[in-house]
Structures are given as C-alpha cells and as structure tokens.
Amino acid sequence: MSAPPDHSTERQPLHDDPDPQDPDLSLIQSGRAPGESGRNGYYTDPIISSSLENPYCDTTESDTGLRHVTMSEVIPRPWLTYRQIEIAAYISVVFFIITGIFAVKFVRRARLHQSKGLMGMAQRDLRLTVRLIYASAVLGIILYFIIIPVAAS
C-alpha cells in the first residue's frame, strides 16, 4: 500500500508573500503613475477630470477674451432678480400644478446652467420659466374663477 497523500499543501496560501519591489504593488501603495516623480499623492488624468466635472469646459474656460456675464443680464426684462422668478415659480404651482411643476423644473435647471457658466442655456431656461409662470397664472384664473363656479352651479 502506498502512503496517503500529503494534504498540507492545500492549507497553504495560494499566493506568495508580495515582493516589496514589485512595480504594480508599489504603484498601488504610493498612488502615483509610473512616470510621475512624486509631486502629489494621487494621479489624475487632466483630460478625464475636467470632462467629468464640466463637459463644456473647453468652451467656457479656454477663451480669455470672453467677458463675464452676470445673472442679472440673463434674467428676462420685467423681472429684477433670479429670486423673484424662483418664488413666482413656486407660487405658480398653486395656480395650476402642471405648468407650475415645469416652471420649478426649469428654474432649477437655469440655476444649474448658471453655476456651470452656461449663460445662454440659463437664459433660455429662464425665458421658458417665465412663460410657464404666466401660463400657470392664466390657467389658474380660468380654472378657479370660471370653470369651477360654472361646474358648481
């Protein structure tokens, strides 16, 4: 009869102790790219980091000849501040809920575009918001003062 097989090798770890000079492990531990000398602790690719943060970065930050447009220049004429439009959008929900919700949606989107520096898109969204506020007021007046009293009588 032969001797039983030695099963002690099955209990040993499948990997050897890592060599501290292993390039892959040393890069992971240091957080540096292969060609980086050690200026900062973590490597980030500048193309990837700027495109994830702001996809319009090339159009908003590359031309130094562009003048800075303030939010007050973007707001439609009869309105004075962004805050007025925002409050009116929330009030428009009370008059007519469908157009009011869309007004709130577009006023929030305008604030987002303004924070990214996309003033043309912010201006477009604010114009649409103001139109939805007006439509909500008109539809609310028609609903509350004409349709509901006629239906109730």
Image (cartoon, rainbow, N blue to C red):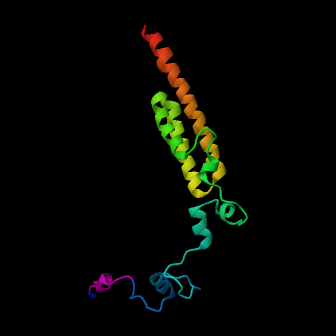
Left or right placement of residue 112 versus residue 144 in this view: right
Residue at image coords 45%, 12%? 149
Residue at image coords 60%, 43%? 126
Residue at image coords 71%, 67%? 64
Residue most toward the right? 65
The answer to which of 26 and 134 lies nearer the viewer is 134
Q: Is residue 125 above or below residue 44?
A: above
Q: Is residue 20 above or below residue 112?
A: below
Position of the N terminus, as image quadrant, is bottom left
Rendered location of residue 61, percent (x, y): 66, 64
Residue 22 inside the magenta-drawn segment: no
> Which quarter of the picture shows residue 151?
top left
Q: Is residue 93 above or below residue 8?
A: above
Left or right placement of residue 51 versus residue 41 in this view: right
The answer to which of 39 and 118 lies nearer the viewer is 118
Q: Magenta segment, which residues?
A: 4-14
Residue at image coords 50%, 84%? 27
The answer to which of 42 and 139 lies nearer the viewer is 139
Q: Is residue 41 above or below residue 50?
A: below
Residue 7 inside the magenta-drawn segment: yes
Rendered location of residue 57, percent (x, y): 64, 63
Rendered location of residue 150, percent (x, y): 47, 10
